[in-house]
Image (cartoon, rainbow, N blue to C red):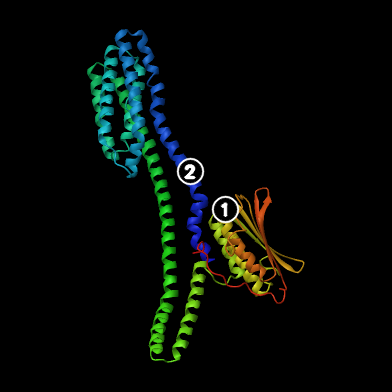
Amino acid sequence: MKELTEVIGHVRGWRRGWTERTKLQRIDLYTRVTLCALPWIFLVSWGLLPLGATLDRGPAAMALGGAFFAVNAVQCLLSNRNVSLSFAHYRGSEPFPMRRLRLPAALLAVLTGLLVALAAVGGIKDEGLALLVLDLPVAFTIPYVLLVPVRTYLLHCTAFAVALVALLAAVGVPGGLLFGAALSLFVVFLLVLTSTRPSAWSMSVMWQAEDARDMQARLAVAEERLRFGRDMHDVLGRNLAVIALKSELAVELAQRGNAAAVDQMVEVQRIARASQQEVRDVVRGYREADLPTELLGAKGVLEAAGISCTVEGADGPAGIGAPPAIQAALGWVVREAATNVLRHGDPRHCVIRLTTAAGAVVLEVENDGAGAAPEVGGGVGSGLAGLRERLAALGGSLEAGAAGDGLFRVTATVPLTAPRGLPPPAPRSVSPEER
C-alpha cells in the first residue's frame, strides 16, 4: 500500500485538518475571551463594590469614586484591544508596538492617584481599600505580562507596589491597611502571572504543533513530487538516449542505402511504445496488487487516519484460497476503496469483508459517515470505473453506493471460474485528467 501510505499525510489534512484547526481556533478564542473578561469581572466586583461607600462620604469622595470607575472602564477597553496583539507578540508572529502602552500606563498612574486621593479624603472603608488595590493593576498587567520577560515583570510589579504603599503611607493610611494593600498587590500580580503566561504558552505550543503538521504535509507533497520526478527520469532517461542513438544510426544507414535502417527504426518504434507504457505505469502508480498485503496495508492506513478498521474472512477460502488472478483484482478493489474511505465523508469505522457465495468471491468494503457518493460512472478507466474494467476481465462486477443509515458500501463479485474466451482489457491512451 505504498501509494496510500504516501498520501496519508495530506489525506488526514483533507479529512481531519479542518476539524482539528477549528477546535484549536475555538480553544484560542476561549482563552482570549477569558483574558478579556477578567478585567471586567474585577471591575464590577472588587472595583465597584467598595466605591458604594463613597455615596455617603461627601461630594469629593463621590467625584473621586466616579472618576476611578470611569478611568478603570477605559483601562479595561484598552486591555481588551491589546490582548490579541500581545498574544501575537508572545508567539513571535507579530511585534507589539510599544507605543500602545503609553496610554494604559498613563491611565494606571491616574488610577493610582485617584486611589490615593480616595484614601486621603476617607472616601472608602478600610476593607474596601484592599479590594480596590486588587482591581487597580489587573487591566494593565494582563497584556503587559506577555510583552516582557518574567523577571522584568516581577521587578516592575515590585517597584509599583513599593511606590503605591509609600503613597498610601504618605496620606496617613495605617500600617495594618498598608500590609493588606501590599498583600493584595502580591496576590493580583501572582494571579495574572500564573493565569496569563501559562495560557499563552499552551496556545503557542498548540499552534506550533499545528504549523508543524501543515509543514509535514507540504514536505510529504514535495517528497512525492521528487519521487515522481525520479521515477520519470529513470523511465525515460535511458530509453530516450537509446532512441536518439538508434535514430542517428538509422539516418546514417539510410544515407548509405543500407536496408538495416528499417530494422533500427522498427526498434525505435518498439522502444517508444514500451516507454509510453512505462510512463502510464508510473502515472497510474501501477504494480501488481497482492490481496493479503493490500488488506493489511488498508487496515494500517485507515487506523493511522483515526478510522477503526475490521477485516473479516481474510484467512478463509475467499481470501488466501482464491486464485492468484482473483486475489490481484480484489487487491486493487481494496486499495481503491480504502482511498475513497479516506477521501470522502467523515468515517469512523470501516469493515472489509470477504465471503464466498454461489461459486463467487464477494468483497464488501463498508464505512459509516458517508458524504456525497463518489462518481463511478464517468471517467472510464479511472477510480471505481477502472476497477469495473479490471473485474470484467474476470467475469466479475462492481457495485458502489449508499447502503442506508449513513453507510457507503463497495461490493465486488468475482466468479471462482472465469469465463472462457474473455479477452483481457485492451490498452488505452492516457487521458489529460490522468496526467
Residue with the mark numbered 1: 344
**Dividing the picture into quarters, in which one does residue 240 lie?**
bottom left
- What is the three-letter code of the residue carrying label 2? Thr
Q: Which mark is residue 112?
A: none
Find numbered disc 2 in the image and state the secondary structure of the residue it sits on: helix
Mark pair 1, 2: CA separation? 19 Å
Q: Closer to the N terminus: mark 1 or mark 2?
A: 2
Is residue 187 or residue 236 the one in the foreground? 236
* Side (left or right) of 106 relative to 421: left
Q: Position of residue 138 (x, y in %)?
A: 34, 28
Task: Pick out the residue farthest to the right.
Answer: 358
- What is the three-letter code of the residue carrying label 1? His
* Side (left or right) of 320 relative to 198: right
Q: Residue at x 32, y 27 (%)?
A: 137
Is residue 350 or residue 252 the one in the foreground? 252
Q: Position of residue 239 (x, y in %)?
A: 43, 78
Answer above or below: position of 251 versus 339. Answer: below
Is residue 54 or residue 80 the one in the foreground? 80
Is residue 145 or residue 24 the one in the foreground? 24
Find numbered disc 1 in the image and state the secondary structure of the residue it sits on: loop
Answer above or below: position of 259 versus 201. Answer: below
Answer above or below: position of 242 versus 91. Answer: below
Residue with the mark numbered 2: 22
* Side (left or right) of 45 relative to 418: left
Q: Position of residue 270 (x, y in %)?
A: 50, 81
